[in-house]
Image (tube, rainbow, N blue to C red):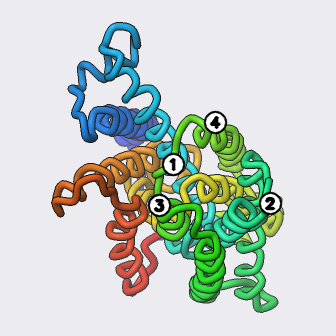
Amino acid sequence: MRAEAVTPASSSHVLHLSRRRPITRLTLIALSGLLLLGAMIVALGSGSQSIAPDEVIQALQDRESVKKSVALIIHEVRLPRALAGALVGLNLAVAGALLQGVVRSPLGDPYILGVSAGGGFAAAATSLRVEGFPPDAVPVMAFIGALIGALIVYAIAWDGSGVTTTRLALAGVALTAMMSALTTTVVVMSVQGGGQIIFQWLVGGLYTAGWREYHLIVPYSIAGFVLAMLLARRANILALGDEMAQGLGLHVEWTRFLMSAVAAVLAGSAVAVAGLIAFVGLLVPFVARRLVGSDFRFLLPTCALLGAALLVGADTAARVTFPALFDLKNIEFPVGIITALIGGPLFLWLVRARRAQW
């Protein structure tokens, strides 16, 4: 095929586009940050006592400038829950993006591939059944359980020459079902912990999220996101295919393991705080990839911000919008129900699609 001649005008146009594209991506990342900020303000102002957005901002700037009751509600009740929820959403979304890079498929989600289920079982077993187990060590056990879950699924799907997305998805669904049954057994045996805690483990929720849970998850979120960004270049090379990646000097299986381990850290710590929240790692990377493309240097920050915004917004809907819709006072829905209602149809559509939406 003969190459077309490139005129100076056309070459300058191409150069302009190449310069504009990163700027466009950065703009979209900034807009994602603004979306998160808006979701946070709405979350802090919504509840049994509504607080105007300007009063929320004023309380955040200067706690002493508002009523003590307003300051107490925002700083001691709603702010830690919103921050913890944002970090849970960030963790699950970035973990989903990494796992999708590992399997090169949009079906790579911590919940679908058994990562969350493994972490959830380990966290529930240690925190609910081991007397005197230190709470600060629960995310570590959740990470170990999540990593073991990922390795089991990968080992089942491996046939000696590689893995396929279909085998990974089927193995993940089977492991999730088994681990969920074991987790249900653990929480039913620990019914004295209260119904809300049980629902949090089984469906995913932020009922008990406070400053302790925020401080518990924040180091894992920071470390996991930093490690994910350090792996962004390798993830981009891996996306080219195994043969080309190996030709460029990349250790393919080692890179997959590192990406899976970081995803396990992120997903495990999220499960330890909020239980089994489904489909955040499926939905957010799907949207982010269509906004900023598949370059992990831009994809991961976008997933982090959109994932945080999604979970903060979903939690607000779960504790305020849905109870009001069904006229249920003093009752809040698990946030996992909201994410399942949004992400479930997307998962079915991706499975039904004739060609990979990658």
Q: Position of residue 337 (x, y in %)?
A: 37, 67
Q: Amino acid at mark 4?
A: His
Question: As displayed, is residue 209 above or below residue 49?
Answer: below
Q: Residues within 10 Å of mark 1 (few under 14, many from 20)?
A: some
- What residue is shown with label 2? 250
Q: Is residue 200 left or right of 174 when viewed as pictured? A: left
Task: Mark 1 vs mark 4: give the one in front.
Answer: 1
Of residues 87 and 95, the one nearer the viewer is 87
Work out how far the residue at label 3 is from the one at label 4, CA to CA, in angstroms.
21 Å
Marks 3 and 4, the one that precedes in the sequence: 3
Assign a secondary structure to mark 4.
Answer: helix
Assign a secondary structure to mark 2.
Answer: loop
Q: Amino acid at mark 2?
A: Leu
Work out how far the residue at label 1 is from the one at label 4, CA to CA, in angstroms.
13 Å
Work out how far the residue at label 4 is from the one at label 2, CA to CA, in angstroms.
36 Å
Question: As displayed, is residue 160 above or below residue 332?
Answer: below
- What residue is shown with label 4? 215
Q: Are marks 3 and 4 in contact (CB under 8 Å)?
A: no
Q: Quadrant of residue 243?
A: bottom right
- What residue is shown with label 3? 196
Task: Mark 4 vs mark 2: give the one in front.
Answer: 4
Q: Residue at x 71, y 72 (%)?
A: 150
Q: Are marks 3 and 2 in contact (CB under 8 Å)?
A: no
